[in-house]
Amino acid sequence: MNGAIPAWHGKIAESDLQPICQNVRDGGGRLVALWGSDRRATQQGFVLHTLLVNETGLVCLDLPLSGDHPAYPDISHIFPAANRMQRAVYDLLGIYAHEGHDHRKWLRHGAWHSGSFPLRKDFDAAQSRTGDLDSYPFVQVEGVGVHEIAVGPVHAGIIEPGHFRFSIVGEKMLRLEQRFGYTHKGTEKLFESMTLQQGAKLAGRVSGDSTVAYAWAYAMAAENIANIAPPDRALWLRALFLERERVANHLGDLSYLGNDVALSFGFAQFWILKEQVLRNNAALFGHRYLMDSIIPGGVAVDISTEGKRVIELECAMLEREVRLLRSIYDEHAGVQDRFIGAGCVAPQLAAQLGLCGLAGRASAQAWDTRVQFPCAPYDKLDVQMATYRNGDVAARVIVRFDELFESLRLQREILVNLTGGGELAIPLAKLPGNGFGVGMVEGWRGEVTMAMHTDAQGNLARVHPHDPSWQNWPVLEHTVLGNIVPDFPLINKSFNLSYSGQDL
Amino acid sequence: MYQIIKQIIKTGIKTETAPQPDEAMRVVTQRLQQQILDVFGRALAIRHVDAGSCNGCELEIHAVNNAYYNIEGLGIKFVASPRHADMLLVTGPVSRHMETALKRTYDATPEPKLVVAIGDCGRDGGIFGESYAICGGVANVIPVDVVVSGCPPTPNAILQGILTAISAQK
């Protein structure tokens, strides 16, 4: 495939799926995403799409399946992260993973009944409605002194909804089981009724805190199908937006990590810095979180010479202030006592479970799309990857600090390269028919992926956004084992995963 | 400790003036008596409920807690349970999977209670509209007093919406 990220795309037979996955796994590769599509209208049955990554690039596998009883061999014993993805594929399309050991529903609660599948083209929303409450078979832990704490979906803080079931003995967590899908908004179905431009807005709202990463991944997938490259200036601006999104989110997380260990000084200070970044975004680009700034074909907003000056001053201010605050965090005995050793993921476990993104890099998983597959303009930026081995809350804090400073450096480099004028976008009204494109962007949380299929007329036939939270949520279940309940909010915050991004 | 105190003094007070209530945000006529509103006006407890948002509105609700907007300085705070709350701050669109949880949260909130719907999605479902997975705006599920539009609304607009709900109708 031609595109910003090196990718290979091909059709495979059912018997090839497991061996190819095993092969990629043995070579140190990972599973990125798994989704299905309904092509019965063109007599092609169903198709299962598997997206893998190894050190040379992306591998997109299409496995054609029968239209009557679509099924494929389980791959969750090769990639544990596939478990929830396989269950979601069944809930949405009725494509079944045989040999799998866990067939519980995942995204489906009571909104549609078990015999109907929303992403099938003949899905009848009115006929599928149920008033059923969700009943879900949690795994029970039994023994003397074991009790359960059920939390959610409405949580005690200002966070997204999800359910956590803790099995506790004394203060120690013996088991955590997550139940998500509460924010399922039918996002993938909605894409299918949208134009390319409407879809870009929706892509920016899959997970609001990563709006730039999603909008870019969506644009990249569309440009991949159209086989075009956006103007140079647009690419530099996209990178500028992405790094600003990373800075804003890392500042916010460092604020709340301070708050969660009762250092309200840290909360106040980092929030002041984040607010200044957001205000500059609003003043320069018209939106505090840069929503809708990236469009297929380019970008929607430009930067002026004065704007560049504002960002230069902001970078200098942040560099100075964050350095000072970091030294305060580092030297604060109470803070370090809570950070060090809490919620530890050893590198071996991280590799086994496929932990990715920021949390992965804190557990020695050296994956960063900007480094491995540097699409323009990252090919000219030489991004320094931040990695650490300890895998605890302290390590995830250090990675955030390191990446923050690197993002400030990158923003300055980008500003130097943003010279003169030039086009902001090339028109991209309609895509070619029967196309397939993929986009992958290293958002602040991890790799954000977007897969796009067009029908014969070039309309959006299937769009699959994929959040790194799919990979990382299950790891959190392992991370908390043996930790005490009061450390859960801290550990959870140190990952800061998206609910909306995985509930779709 | 010296560094912390020095930084606090250097930072100074960032808090800005709170916005004035805006009657345009009110969607029903005032339901509560002046006397009750006077009490709420000095100590309001809010329970936030994410009924299916993309988490964009949550970012801005967090922001009203920062030093610039300083919502706690106005006597308003976020609480951990609807049973402690006077007001529900609900972000949408309301997903069908959150419909029951939202209704139960509303029922668990003691009377008199106020509801403020946040964002374009909280208003009418926004870009997500109504579908097999979405009930639409918050008002389709529970009664709403004030709506704050925006994608996401600014922290100032959110603060304004909250203050409108607890102010007497003009």
Image (cartoon, coloured by chain):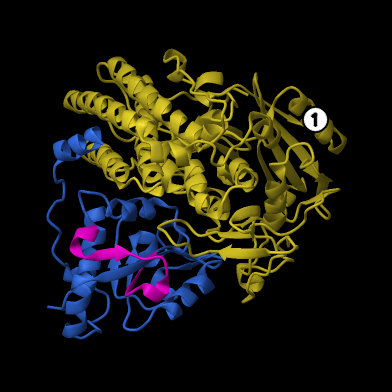
Chain colours: A yellow, B blue
> Which of the 4 image quadrants contains residue A366?
top right
Q: Secondary structure at mark 1?
A: helix
Q: What stretch of residues is rendered in magenta?
A: B71-90
Vertical arrangement, residue A470 with respect to residue A167, above or below? above
Residue bearing mark 1: A22
- The number of discs equals 1
Q: How far across and down, in percent of the image, does residue B124 sit? A: 38, 66
Q: Which chain does the numbered disc 1 sit on?
A: A
Classify residue B11 as left or right of residue A275.
left
> Which of the 4 image quadrants contains residue A364?
top right
Q: How far across and down, in percent of the image, does residue A259 sit? A: 36, 47
In what quadrant of the picture does the N terminus of chain A appear? Answer: top right
Residue visible at 35% across and 37% down? A251
Q: How far across and down, in percent of the image, does residue B59 sit? A: 36, 50
Depth check: B35 or A44 in front?
Answer: B35
Depth check: A433 or B104 in front?
Answer: B104
Q: Is residue B87 magenta?
A: yes
